[in-house]
Image (spheres, rainbow, N blue to C red):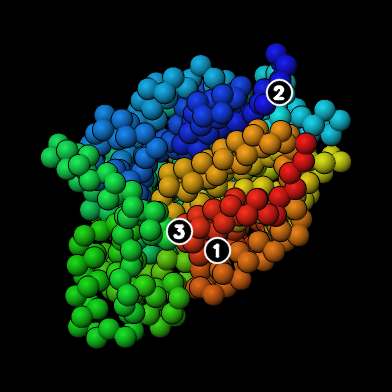
Amino acid sequence: MKHDNHTLDAIIVGAGFSGLYQLYCLREKLNHKVKVLEAGGDVGGTWYWNRYPGARCDSESHTYCYYFDKHLLEEWSWSERYPGQAEILRYLNFCAQKLDLKKDIRFNERVTEAEWDANSQLWHVKTQTGQTFIARFLITAVGCLSSANMPDIDGLSDFKGEIYHTGQWPHDTVDFEKKTIVVIGTGSTGIQAIPEIAKYAKKLYVLQRTPNYSVPARNRPLSRDFHSAFIEDIDSWRSKMLESRHGHPWIAPDRQVRKTSAEERYRIMEAAWEHGGLSFRESFDDVLLDEESNNIMSEFIRQKIMSTVHNVKTAKKLLPKDHPFGTKRPPIDTNYFETYNLEHVHLIDVRQNPIASCSSAGIILTDDTKIEADMIVFATGFDAMTGALQKMNIKGRDGLKLAEAWLAGPQTYLGLAVPKFPNMFTITGPGSPSVLTNMPRAIEQHVDWITDLLRHMVQRGYSKVEAREAAANEWTEHVTDVANKTLLPKANHSWYLGANVPGKPRVFMPYVFGLNHYRNHCDFIAVSGYQGFLITE
């Protein structure tokens, strides 16, 4: 692709799993001149920022990694069934070093504006340091869960103690010893952090709005024998992941909960519970499709909570009843419910008694209850799928802001491209399977597809590509229709719908039909000459 000495072929925003692989592909396969702009001080993306205690992946380690390079798979040996934040960060640094990627990454460069210039047909990207970068293509690799959602609590600035958000955790050690701590939020991050904080805190108050289902992870160390056996069977692991709807190496068997005898389904669920992990939900194939089946599995988990938590009042507060199991992100945990058996841990239902304000000493509830604290930890999640993209102040044709284009909810074609934003791609954007999958599998599919499209353009002398509006409208409608055939939209407070962020449009954002079907559809679009895209010289 033609460029002068000052113009890049592509700018990639973000140096996590997506950005690193996209850099490798464009540089090594297309010989493109590329720079990655990364807000953080090193590679890692999600795993650079999310350093909170207990931060751990919910995909099994030997599947949560790159599969495009066999040498990377052979040379890196995971230590645990579910990798922790520090180990994943070491892994991504290992990959960056092996592939010599860091020389093309600009760290501590947070993008503040990206604007398409129609005359030159180039993207002008500005950063917080005052730098401007110019490129033919803009590829966002900012992650689906990277824009922290901080609640607006009256008087929070008056609090004299320490304040942290799990998604923006400091690199220095946070000391919990002998402190009274408030944790707000019991989603995936809260469920991971609460047991760890409880080990050290003098007193811990958990402020819960929505009780959550959670399945034990059953994490454990992996032996060297495991790694050597895995190396011999890489192709099998890969094919299993590609065949499944979620990018994990297991597929739900052809059986329905409600059509299985009570004795048999209990045996199956009990065995899956003891095995642990996300595969519990895949014990049957109708859990997200049939309300009666979901009720049975949901009740199984509720009974597990009641039998685990000793205090009956506390146990009942922890019972999720306002959404079907699996319709919000399904957490897996290590001793989460057991933590509420500790005398110094107190659960407060803020749906019944909401947070009214904050004082210099702590939290004040609506009934005027005062919770004095040394530290407040917000485990309140993210402005998922769209937040990080909109914060970059991206402007497409005629100065159209992405935030304005998505005022009624995100509209994309395949989750990859947005009408009126030429030469821009969104890796695992809204409208793609993304967060409903084992993310590296979705990421590799997206990056490979984008790379193939750019190769197609190079070979034919094309310089501009844009999603057609009709194609994006049709795809977005399809994403909604598919979601509505499942139970997933029934979770009123799910970030899948943007419901955790005040004022955000309620639109189901991920593509539910499965990564396997999605991949086949994307392949068809490519083979058909990239229908739905306008590609010009």
As helix, strand or loop, the secondary structure at mark 2 comes to loop
- Circle nearer the viewer, 3 or 2: 2
What amino acid type is highlighted by mark number 2?
Lys
Given this view, does label 1 or label 2 mark the residue nearer the observer?
Answer: 2
Q: Report the Cα–Cα distance between label 3 and label 2.
A: 35 Å
Any mark on residue 2, and which?
A: 2
Q: Looking at the rendered structure, which numbered label has been put on residue 71?
A: none
Residue at (54, 53) in percent of width and height: 523
Q: Is residue 375 left or right of residue 233?
A: right
Q: Earlier in the sequence, mark 1 or mark 2?
A: 2
Q: Is residue 86 left or right of residue 398?
A: left
Identity, as a three-letter code, of the amino acid under mark 3: Asn
Q: Which residue is mark 3?
A: 516
* Residue 463 x, y percent position in the rendering: 73, 34
Q: Which mark is residue 493?
A: 1
Q: Residues within 10 Å of mark 2 (few under 14, many from 20)?
A: few
Q: Residues within 10 Å of mark 3 (few under 14, many from 20)?
A: some
Residue drawn at the location 60% of the way across and 36% of the way down: 455
Amino acid type, label 1:
His
Residue 341: percent from left, percent from top: 25, 58
Regarding mark 3 in the picture, which secondary structure is present there?
helix
Which quarter of the image is occupied by the C terminus? top right
Q: Circles 3 and 2: CB distance less than 8 Å?
A: no
Q: Of label 3 and label 1, which has the lower sequence position?
A: 1
| Residue for point 75% across, 53% down | 468
For the residues labelled 1 and 2, the Cα–Cα distance comes to: 48 Å
How far apart, in angstroms, are the residues tagged by discs 3 and 1? 28 Å
Helix or strand or loop: what does disc 1 sit on?
loop
